[in-house]
Amino acid sequence: MTSLNHTPVQASQPAPAIGLIIIGDEILSGKRADKHLPKFIELLTERGLQLSWAEYVGDSPERITPVLARAFASGDVVFSCGGIGATPDDHTRQCAAKALGVPLALQAEAKALILERVRDVALEQGLPYEPDRADNQHRLNMGMFPQGAQIIHNPYNKIPGFTCQGAGQGMVHFVPGFPVMAWPMMQDKLDVYCHSWGAAPKRAERSVIVFGAMEATLTPLMEAIELQFPGVKVFSLPSVDHPQWGKHIELGVKGEESLSAEAFAALKTGLQPFKVEFGPEMVR
């Protein structure tokens, strides 16, 4: 596994938008809680990066294929978790090929790694290595990737993931649904990207609790702050029954650290004519 210290470096190219796709009926049914989204955000934050979007989809080829087609057309860097095995409910490899308009093909390096894993398991169990046995031949389906795909090394059990790029320059990295495999694979890919992107500017979120205001009244101010400070996003989170603050609005800004500080000061100044009451301020 690649290991980097994530101190900021000069980026040779800007980071594109980053997306995450999580595939599996077990997530949508609640049978399993998704752990990928918070972990991926953590991995990005450690590297000064930010998630632009995320999407969940069940084990339905009719839904997976258009989701992947959009990712391939997006120009974004996207990670897709789940559905790359070889059981009947695994459709991601086939859907990726369909979205790209290419056939599936047994990737040579993936084949070698899968057979290496078969050999390792046989050795561990004291059994003969039988690559031509029917179940071992079936395992090779896990190396059937869209034609032209590149592998992603799996440090846990050697069964690889894969990467494909679409005509729209969307780069999609496919990893297993198991966190113990997926997270090191995602981390390694992000570390490679950081060599060319460098670390993004440190971002901060600043907000204040506001009492006695309505969102509709504050909207023109919010729009004006975004126009005055390009790159800063203004947010408003109303609550009617907060256990500590009761009815209030958490109003704030998020963006590059120094710019967000300027925008937040402007936001508080802009609130003064509204005669609102202020609660605590927060910085994240």
Image (cartoon, helix red, strand yellow):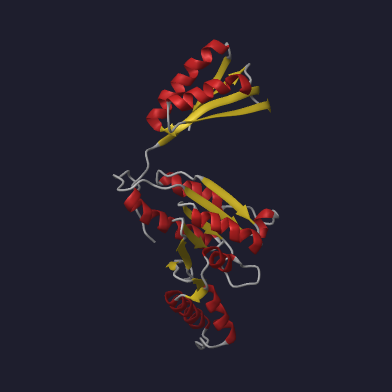
Residue 38 appearing in the image:
yes
Task: Pick whichever, 98 or 282, lies toward us.
Answer: 98
Q: Is residue 273 left or right of residue 87?
A: left
- Name which residue lies at 43% across and 77% down: 108
Q: Is residue 96 left or right of residue 231?
A: right
Residue 170 picture location, percent across and down = 46, 55
- Please tell me how many numbered marks the rendered image carries: 0
Residue 24 picture location, percent across and down = 63, 59
Q: Tell me: residue 32, above or below residue 244.
A: below
Task: Pick whichever, 61 or 243, lies toward us.
Answer: 61
- Name which residue lies at 63% across and 72% down: 87
Q: Tell me: residue 262, above or below residue 137.
A: above
Q: Is residue 46 left or right of residue 126?
A: left
Residue 194 picture location, percent across and down = 36, 51
Q: Quadrant of the N terminus?
A: bottom left
Task: Pick whichever, 54 or 100, lies toward us.
Answer: 100
Q: Tell me: residue 54, above or below residue 110.
A: above
Residue 243 appearing in the image:
no
Residue 50 picture location, percent across and down = 46, 43
Residue 261, quarter of picture: top left
Residue 210, quarter of picture: top right
- Name which residue lies at 65% across and 71% down: 88
- Name which residue lies at 49% across and 45% down: 51
